[in-house]
Image (cartoon, rainbow, N blue to C red):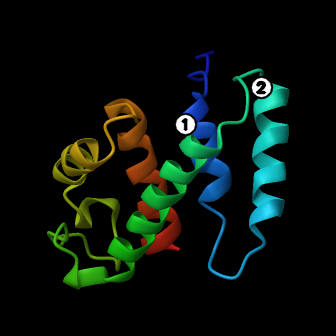
């Protein structure tokens, strides 16, 4: 049996924020983040870090909302509509790493994959 990769602070926070949409109550999301951080013993709540990750999440929502008009859209030869390969994930991760240097490249790659699933494929 393969052990799951331990969740980082940034990815744990992003995992909660990913399900936050315009009009949602921010306090509710922040309470969920605090509980998750406490439960997983990932550290104290940091509002500045949460704000950076929320900005990253909003950027990803906007980018994947563009669908085929996204600068990162490369299309796919797969027969079904919408595939993870429709976007240049490596280039997107590299550009996001430049804009969000406080977030690890590894976590950014995982966040981009989750965002493709949530905001494009679903």
Which residue matches tag 2? Answer: 40
Q: Position of residue 67 (x, y in %)?
A: 31, 81
* Quadrant of the rendered image containing residue 70: bottom left
Q: Secondary structure at mark 2?
A: helix
Which residue is more in the foreground, 91 or 87?
A: 91
Q: Residue at x 58, y 17 (%)?
A: 2
Q: Nearer the viewer, residue 85 or 93?
A: 93
Above/below status of 19 relative to 107? below
The crowding category of the residue bearing disc 2, from other C-alpha atoms within 10 Å (few below 14, some 14 to 19, many at least 20), is: few
Q: Pointer 1: what residue?
A: 10
What's the mark number on residue 101? none
* Residue 43 at x, y percent in the picture: 71, 23
**In this view of the protein, which residue sits in the foreground, 78 or 108?**
108
Q: Relative to 115, is 38 on the left or the right?
A: right
Helix, strand or loop status at disc 1: helix
What is the spatial separation of the Cα atoms under label 1 and label 2, in whole angstroms?
Answer: 12 Å
Question: Relative to 5, is 16 on the left or the right?
Answer: right
Instruction: Say which residue appears at 39% left-offset and 52% top-offset.
Output: 112
Residue at 47% in and 60% down: 55
Q: Quadrant of the N terminus?
A: top right
Task: Give above or below for 118 relative to 51.
Answer: below
Residue furthest to the front in view is 48
In this rendering, would 120 be left or right of 68? right
Image vertical order of residue 17 relative to residue 21, above or below: above
Image marks 1 and 2: residues in contact by CB distance under 8 Å: no
The crowd level at tag 1 (other Cα within 10 Å; few <14, some 14-19, many 20+) is: some
The residue positioned 34% from the left and 77% from the top of the image is 80
């Amino acid at each position: 049996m393969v052990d799951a990769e331990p969740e980082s602070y940034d990815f744990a926070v992003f995992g909660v924020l990913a399900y936050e949409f315009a009009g949602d109550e921010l306090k509710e999301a922040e309470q969920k983040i605090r509980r998750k951080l406490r439960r997983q013993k990932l550290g104290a709540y940091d509002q500045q870090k949460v704000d950076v990750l929320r900005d990253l999440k909003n950027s990803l929502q906007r980018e994947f909302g563009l669908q085929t008009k996204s600068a990162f859209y490369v299309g796919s030869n797969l027969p079904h509509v919408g595939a993870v390969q429709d976007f240049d994930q490596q280039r997107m991760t590299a550009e996001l790493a430049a804009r969000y240097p406080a977030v690890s490249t590894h976590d950014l790659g995982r966040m981009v994959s989750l965002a493709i699933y949530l905001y494009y494929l679903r």
